[in-house]
Amino acid sequence: MTTPRPDHRRNASPFLNGTEPDAVARVLESGQYGHTDVTEEFEHRIAAYLGVPDAVAVTSGTAALHSALLAADIVPGDEVIVPSMTFCATVQAILAVGATPRFIDIDPATLCVTPQLIEEAVTDATAAVLPVLFGGRAIDLTPIHDHLNERGISVIADAAHAFGSRNGTHLVGSDSATLTCFSFGPIKNLTCGQGGAVIPRTPEEAATLRRLRLLGVAQSQSERAETTTYQVAGFGLRYQLSALNAAIGLAQLDTFDTTAATRRRLWHTYRDALTELDGVALIDVGPDHAVPHLCQVRVQHRDDVFAHLRKAGIGVGVHYPPNHLQPAFALWSRPLPATEQVGTEILSLPFHQHLTEAEIHHVVTSLRDALQHAGGRVMPTKLLTVCLGNYCRSPFAQLALTRRSGPAVAVRSAGLISKWQDQPANPTMTKAARRLGYDLTAHRGRHITLEMLRWADTVLAMDASVLTTLRTVFGPRYESKTGLYLDDHDVPDPIGQDDASFFECAVMIEAGTALHLT
């Protein structure tokens, strides 16, 4: 029997429900292909679906972002906070209005920004925040809405991936405090072939957006048909959505509930299949509330895995190379450790409604093979078990365990432990480090911890055995039938059990998160 293999050409083709050709044919027969009543019907249907007063259709998601920034009065000299982990169109839209992108980091578990990361990045020049709802995951900025409002900072959401997703019980786009931008491109959750929409916050903003999308003309097409003149009220662009594209969108809306359910089912199929595959971390899109747009994993040796899968005919991709490392945006680059780490690990698996469950299992099997070829073997997920309770009381260790977000976050989190900032190395740490050839006596505790975390990551990147590595550091007493356990009662510690177990847990948890083990 032939093994089901997903056709990689389908990755870039839309999923049509069968009624789109007739819908387009009706527009062609009408002879009116520009912005017509078909376009306006599409706007009304989008607004009704979201439960909002208005929606303004435009030619693309990029046009939606550009128009929204203009409507929000973002001008040269303004600063716009934006994640580096996004498609370059997000950043280009900021530059198109003359504003400055201020790149910020992400939560590696979701690839999304957080309220805390945004709040930390705000400066006196900040005029807007542009969160990206990566992969379809909604972002709740409620904790900082009041703070942003007090400072006059607009929230413009890049929801290109997130049509149909929910923030709690509310659909993305229904928040009256946010200018939301959707994309209806060829492979989005809902497609118009090409298209986009902006959900305005006020009627005045809607009017501005409509002028902007039609070269600054204030009158609608129907109004212009009844008069001998029209008024150009200001700057504008040709961003109106064609009736041909709107007709496709209307046909797609008729079956969107089925689309949403199918995408969730396929994502869950991937999730269940990937649990059998060790050394892989699935990016959390929040599938209970999202309509997933992507299915992504983080893997070691990503480039080798990518090449092996492509050679095997599996249409994997990378969404996206970090923008702050791109030549075009080098002027605004700054260190973003989580983004940079994820940028070397992220891999997008084939994800579209053409997929069957059998094809998903074939992709996962191929991924297993690719990992074995790239790294020499697949690490057993249950090799490392870290116990909390009395054995691990440090805030860092608990945070790292809870997040399981990778080395970059673990290193950053280490700075939260103030007691390690000013203390010299204790004898337990020094003794363990000497086994590895490190002289830590000249360092202070926080630097020791960071050094050892980096060491753990380096060793694992060289594909050393986790078991051998940890035996080298801690000795064979930590081995058991069910894995490796921390036990601070077994550690000679003249300073204190918490301090000693913090060091042990730092290295062991880093070993685990570097390989995405549980």
Image (spheres, rainbow, N blue to C red):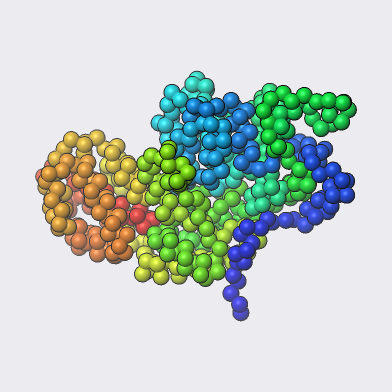
Q: Is residue 22 left or right of residue 290?
A: right
Name above or below for residue 57 compared with residue 20.
above
Residue in the picture at 30% in, 59% down: 460
Whether residue 257 is visible here, answered yes or no, is no
- Position in image of residue 125 (x %, y %): 45, 25
Residue in the picture at 33% in, 46% down: 410
Position of the C terminus, as image quadrant, is bottom left
**Residue 479, located in which quarter of the rendered image?**
bottom left
- Position in image of residue 164 (x %, y %): 64, 43
Residue sitting at the far bottom: 1
**Residue 73, located in which quarter of the rendered image?**
top right
- Position in image of residue 412 (x %, y %): 32, 42
Residue in the picture at 77% in, 57% down: 18
- Position in image of residue 91 (x %, y %): 52, 40
Q: Is residue 370 left or right of residue 353?
A: left
**Residue 481, located in which quarter of the rendered image?**
bottom left
Residue sitting at the far top: 150
Whether residue 193 is visible here, answered yes or no, is yes
- The image shows a total of numbered marks equal to 0
Position of the N terminus, as image quadrant, is bottom right
Name above or below for residue 444 compared with residue 359.
above
Name above or below for residue 125 compared with residue 281.
above
Residue in the picture at 80% in, 25% down: 230
Q: Is residue 23 left or right of residue 511?
A: right
